[in-house]
Amino acid sequence: MAPDPRPPLLTMSGITKSFPGVRALDGVDLEVAPGEVHCLLGQNGAGKSTLIKVLAGAHQPDGGRVVWNGEPVRLRSPSAAVRLGIATLHQELDLVEGLSVAENAYLGHEPATAGFVRARAARTATAALLKRLGHPEIDPARRVGGLSAAQRQIVSMARALSHDVRLIVMDEPSAALDPDEVDNLFRIVADLTADGVAVLHISHRLEEIRRIGDRVTVLKDGRAVARGLPAATTPTREVVALMTGRDVPYAFPDRPGPHEAPAPDPVLTVQGLARQGEFEAFDLVLRPGEIVGLAGLVGSGRSEILETVYGARRPTAGRVLVDGRPLRPGSVPAAVRAGLGLAPEERKAQGLLLLESVTRNVSVSSLGRFSRAGWIDRAAERAAARTATRGLSLRPDHPEAPVRTLSGGNQQKAVLARWLLRGCRVLLLDEPTRGVDVGARAELYAVVRRLADEGLAVLLVSSEVPEVLGLADRVLVLREGRVVHEAPARDLDEHRVLDLVMEGSPAA
């Protein structure tokens, strides 16, 4: 373990935790110093969530010891952790949308006199916290339900700072933020650590770890396989190998070479598609076997384009054609019948039936195939779903398991299997690897490339420019709802794309 000159603020030693049939933590050690950004890495299922729930007081460990500021402690509840100065910002922020910013910031410890809440005092104190976080423009009296994802992140941090916080746990804090918002988040982290606040940062984005991290602890199968690695200098390949237990190259599958045969006829054609206030005059020709990527900041219109092509939004102008035949605008059933499938950005909320089985999630768009006189042929449904999931190496291979029990990567495979079973010809992928760990990302990249090689047409949206450039054959760069550049992916690099999305001018 790399030494740190500061005495530890937090030491977790030999932490164990088991659930029925699963040993989630198997003797984990973790040490965090004051003012440090300590990064916690591991694939889904490695034990990260369980460990931070132990630290937050939500789970009681079966064994091990927690030392806080030199004293052994028992974190018997979340409120006990907060009283010590440990605040946790979960990936799915637990804010109350119907309450104001100030009410959320001081929820559970409202300023009060003689039993009466002092609302004005809470708003004043919240305004001071928002100013400290660099966001004085957020109104403490505004309802949280009307805020953007980035603003909600700031409110969650303000709530943490409303206590005498000394350690903030951040679980995938940048997952829903655009690059400017990520920059602001990291500025806040730098300010907090300069004041001596420690940060435990969980992220799948290795470039973030290098940018803000001091040290790294890697979990695999409930164990800490590396502790205190220097974040800036540990090679990516070494980190990936530690996380996966195998030497997985952090790379994308090879693109096919140039073809001598004539290009196939387009399967999807988009002509002058527009939605007022979101994007304008979008044109696209997509051929079988081609992966086209849309690159742009959040708000550039990229997701809205996918949803409009799919019929989930009605265009104000333009049209979508499949095999030269126009689709009825604003009709998802028409798009699905024509062979379009969408893997949405919010996979859990929009793409999955979390309480249903893997089988039902895969078959839900094709139930007509298994209906006999109004009854579902369960055996045929299970057999077809199993064939589709096995082709994607979905794990674990338990078709009746609730889909919510799968990792992020395998949940995404279940969505892909649904559209393959349906006979999809055009796959629309919106943030396909959000919340997916490094090893599973490589598998998903390989799956998407294989499907394209087999003739599927893919339209891809991702916030991660390297992902768009590594997976797509051709890239359209969007800025403020307009295409400002189009080129083969091999002719672009990350710096060029970022220049275009920040300051590009519309393509001629």
Image (cartoon, rainbow, N blue to C red):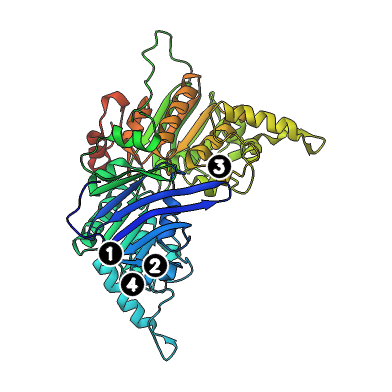
Other residues around mark 3 within 10 Å, as few (<14) / some (14–19) / many (≥20): some
Q: Disc 3 and disc 2: Cα gap in Å?
A: 49 Å
Other residues around mark 1 within 10 Å, as few (<14) / some (14–19) / many (≥20): some
Q: Which residue: 58% across, 50% down? A: 20
Q: Which residue corresponds to mark 1?
A: 135
* Figure quadrant of the C terminus: top left
Q: Amino acid at mark 2?
A: Ala
227 versus 342 height, above or below: below
390 versus 278 height, above or below: above
Other residues around mark 2 within 10 Å, as few (<14) / some (14–19) / many (≥20): many
- Name the disc covering residue 163, or none: 4
359 versus 123 height, above or below: above
Q: Which residue: 40% across, 35% down? A: 244
Q: Quadrant of residue 141?
A: bottom left
Q: Which residue corresponds to mark 3?
A: 330
Marks 4 & 3, CB-CB < 8 Å contact: no
Q: Amino acid at mark 1?
A: His
